[in-house]
Amino acid sequence: MQLKTLDDIDLSGKRVLVRVDLNVPMEDGKITDTTRIKRILPTITELSDKGAKVILLAHFGRPKGKVEPTMSLAPVVSTLAIMLDRPVAFGTDCVGPMAEAAVSALSDGEIVLLENTRFHPGEESKDEDFTKALAANGDIFVNDAFSAAHRAHASTEGLAHLLPSCAGRTMQAELEALEAGLGSPDRPVIAIVGGAKVSTKLDLLHNLVRKVDALVIGGGMANTFLAAQGVDVGKSLCEHDLADTARKIAAEAESAGCEILLPSDGVVATEFKANAEHKTVPINEIPGDSMVLDVGPDTIGRVEDWIKKARTLVWNGPFGAFEIEPFDHATVTVAKFAAMQTNAGNLVSVAGGGDTVAALNHAGVANDFTYVSTAGGAFLEWMEGKVLPGVAVLQSK
Ligand code: AMP
């Protein structure tokens, strides 16, 4: 992959439009988690240090093309300025006279955040006039929002057609990590896919069986695969109508030489609640009144043996109902094992998707993986093998 980066463009004195991810969790006007802000600091600092006029573009929430005061980016400015340790101005619109005034007030190295791009319907429809109005305030476009790169919106894709463009440092780091995970990985590669349902991860499974050497299927979705093989899964979460699909994926894996690892034992309970009475049973002995809420020790051992052989691990989705103890056990145990192998230099580990980040944080190992992507939809589309429009447009022709 030939990606244009900040190293390829002269930035000094230029008006640089930077698409960032500021879609931070907020309660009563206060930011509750600054992870996303932390990630964009290197690009903003580098641009400012190189003497660019830094103009930040971002969306916040889903205002559906209308000005929605509760979705203003104004409350983000002070936190951003504190974290950057330099002043940040605010423009009350991302296009038109207010944006122009905010941008023309900038000296080299100064930073302005413009208001929510999604206050305009032209953002999501990639309207030509709206994209031109955004481009009017910049000489260069830098995209540092991988998490929005699966959308072909005006500020995530359209601008790259109108201005010289490149990836920011965060986007670059994310793409390099993903390339090491599935693009041109060290083999053998093992993928772990867990979570609730097969139906939400069909494209992902079809893609992975062609790319990895072993695919571990855990979580509720394993029940669908087990049931398709004739296993009685009792009251477990199971999409019985997807039995044919599960068999088809298993057949695709076999012809691609990908080993599928399904649970050989499970932790079962009669109720879905924390500390419910539970026991471990072989997978062929799930009681009719019970549901599998986690995989058992035999399965954990088989997965760890495979991780020991592997050079690369790609992970999305928990092994069990990790939000309720003790059904977080397999997810936490395998996550710690993968972290240990990563720290020992034996494994490149890439993980992502909403619940996976929460699960790795819960296990206390999110910082020990090679890369943990906080981009939900974009990460999943990448695992599905899809071309992300916001990335494709930054690749040098
Ligand atoms: P996903 O968003 O598809 O990655 O699914 C994550 C959800 O799957 C979490 O909320 C888990 O509680 C749930 N989950 C994982 N394993 C099971 C299981 N065996 N039974 C029911 N829910 C599960």
Image: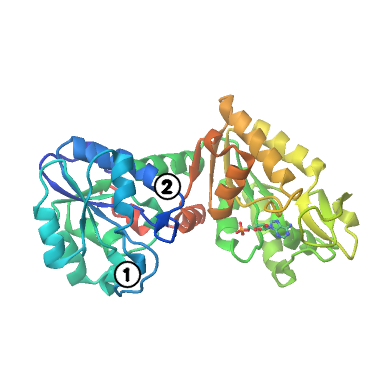
Q: In the rendered view, does 328 fall on the left or right side of 346? A: right
Quadrant, the N terminus: top left
* 32 w.r.t. 302: above or below: below
Alpha carbon distance from label 1 to label 2: 21 Å
Count how many numbered circles sit on residues in the image: 2
Q: Residue 393, percent across and down?
A: 29, 54
Q: Which residue is mark 1?
A: 69
- Point 76% across, 51% down: residue: 294
- Point 16% across, 44% down: residue: 110
The kind of residue on which mark 2 rests is Thr
Query: Can I make out residue 193 in this image?
Result: yes
Q: In the rendered view, does 92 fall on the left or right side of 297? A: left
Q: Nearer the viewer, mark 1 or mark 2?
A: 1
- Point 31% across, 67% down: residue: 118
* 294 w.r.t. 187: above or below: below
Q: Nearer the viewer, residue 281 or 256?
A: 281
Q: In the rendered view, does 222 fall on the left or right side of 129? A: right
Query: Can I make out residue 168 in this image?
Result: no
Q: Which residue is mark 2?
A: 34
The kind of residue on which mark 1 rests is Pro
Q: Quadrant of ligand 1?
A: bottom right
Q: Secondary structure at mark 2?
A: loop
Q: Nearer the viewer, residue 322 or 397?
A: 322
